[in-house]
């Protein structure tokens, strides 16, 4: 049975209380699985996806990854305020885009009237 990259990452982080940057974690995984540069370049995006989706891992500040079991609740909890700000920003952007589109169509109409 072959070992998966995500399992190598899990075993690596078991011994790292502070976590590791994605770059360093991928270097360890790549080395342990013996990936050459070509194979590593093909597999890195799938590894990142797997890491993001696997519930045992969490992404912290500065692209540092750690096991959720090593983190305090406040380190991994999503704050509601973060989403509220993003939703307001997106609404503002949508309104600005609609205004620009409306202005562009008004300009087109006035050009055709002459």
Image (cartoon, rainbow, N blue to C red):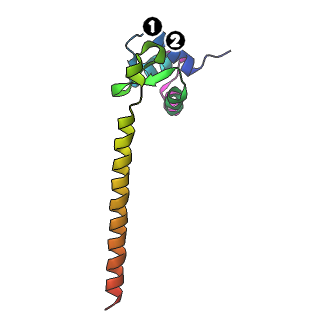
Q: Nearer the viewer, residue 111 or 73?
A: 73
Picture residue at 33% right of the left edge, 27% below the top:
62
Furthest toward the right, the residue is 1
Q: Is residue 33 magenta?
A: yes
Q: For mark 1, what is the residue? A: 15
Q: Quadrant of residue 101?
A: bottom left
Whether 111 is drawn above or below 20: the answer is below
Magenta residue span: 32-42
Mark drawn on residue 81? none
Contact flag, marks 1 and 2 (Cβ < 8 Å): yes
Q: Which image quarter is the C terminus in?
A: bottom left
Q: Residue 22 sits in which quadrant?
A: top left
Residue that protrudes farthest toward the top in the picture: 15
Q: Secondary structure at mark 1?
A: loop
Front position in the image: 24 or 100: 100
Image side of residue 112 versus residue 40, left or right: left
Instruction: Please tell me which residue lies in front, 33 or 110.
Output: 110
Tally the marks: 2
Asked whether, in this view, residue 52 is left or right of residue 83, the answer is right
User: What's the distance in space between the residues labelled 1 and 2, CA to CA?
Assistant: 7 Å
Q: Report x, y in % for residue 47.
A: 52, 28
* Residue at mark 2: 11
Residue 87, position as x, y percentages in the image: 39, 46
Residue at image coords 68%, 15%: 1
Q: Is residue 24 among what the camera can see?
A: no
């Amino acid at each position: 049975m072959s070992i998966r990259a995500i399992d190598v990452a899990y075993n690596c982080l078991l011994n790292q209380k502070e976590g590791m940057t994605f770059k360093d974690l991928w270097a360890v995984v790549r080395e342990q699985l013996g990936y050459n540069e070509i194979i590593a370049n093909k597999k890195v995006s799938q590894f990142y996806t797997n890491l993001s989706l696997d519930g045992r891992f969490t992404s912290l500040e500065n692209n540092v990854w750690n096991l959720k079991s090593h983190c305090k609740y406040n380190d991994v909890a999503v704050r509601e305020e973060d989403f509220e700000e993003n939703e307001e920003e997106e609404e503002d952007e949508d309104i600005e885009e609609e205004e620009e589109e409306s202005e562009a169509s008004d300009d087109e109409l006035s050009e055709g009237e002459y």
